Amino acid sequence: MTEPIKQFSCPRCGNKVEKSLKFFPFCSHHCKYSDLYGWLEGTYRISTHLSDDSHTAEKKPEEK
Ligand SMILES: [Zn+2]
């Protein structure tokens, strides 16, 4: 019996990806890292937004 080869597509750009690929499930390191950076950037923006409230306090080096 021959099992049907599953086709995976890059969640970033939709390109066909082989499961044996180094960057799986991404098609390339570009897609992998652009996704990662996108996620980090989103997290960063959230934290930036939250700290925007204390913007007038500027940086407090030795708060704790
Ligand atoms: Zn891709």
Image: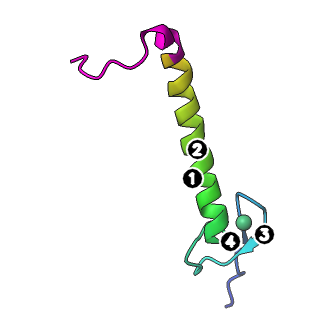
- On the rendered structure, is 42 left or right of 61? right
- Identify whether 52 is placed above or below 44: above
- Regarding ligand 1, which quadrant of the image does it lie in? bottom right
- On the rendered structure, is 44 left or right of 6? left
Packing grade of label 4 (10 A; few <14, some 14-19, many >=20) is many
Q: Which mark is residue 36?
A: 1
- Image coordinates for residue 33, horizontal then vertical, percent: 59, 60
At 68% across and 71% down in the image, what residue appears?
Answer: 27
Q: Looking at this view, is 47 or 61 the one in front?
A: 61
Kindly report which numbered mark, 4 or 1, lies closer to the viewer in this rendering: 1
Amino acid carrying label 2: it is Trp
Q: Secondary structure at mark 1?
A: helix
Residues shaded magenta: 52-64
- Identify whether 26 is placed above or below 63: below
Amino acid carrying label 3: it is Asn
- Would you name the residue on which mark 4 appears? 27
* Label 4–label 3 contact, CB within 8 A: yes
Q: Which mark is residue 39?
A: 2
- Image coordinates for residue 23, horizontal then vertical, percent: 58, 72
- 3D distance between C-alphas at marks 4 and 3: 6 Å
Beta carbon of the mark 3 residue lies under 8 A of ligand 1:
yes
- Tell me if residue 61 is in the magenta stretch: yes
Q: Which mark is residue 15?
A: 3
Location of residue 3 (image quadrant): bottom right
Q: Looking at this view, is 23 or 40 the one in front?
A: 40
Q: Earlier in the sequence, mark 4 or mark 3?
A: 3
Amino acid carrying label 4: it is Cys
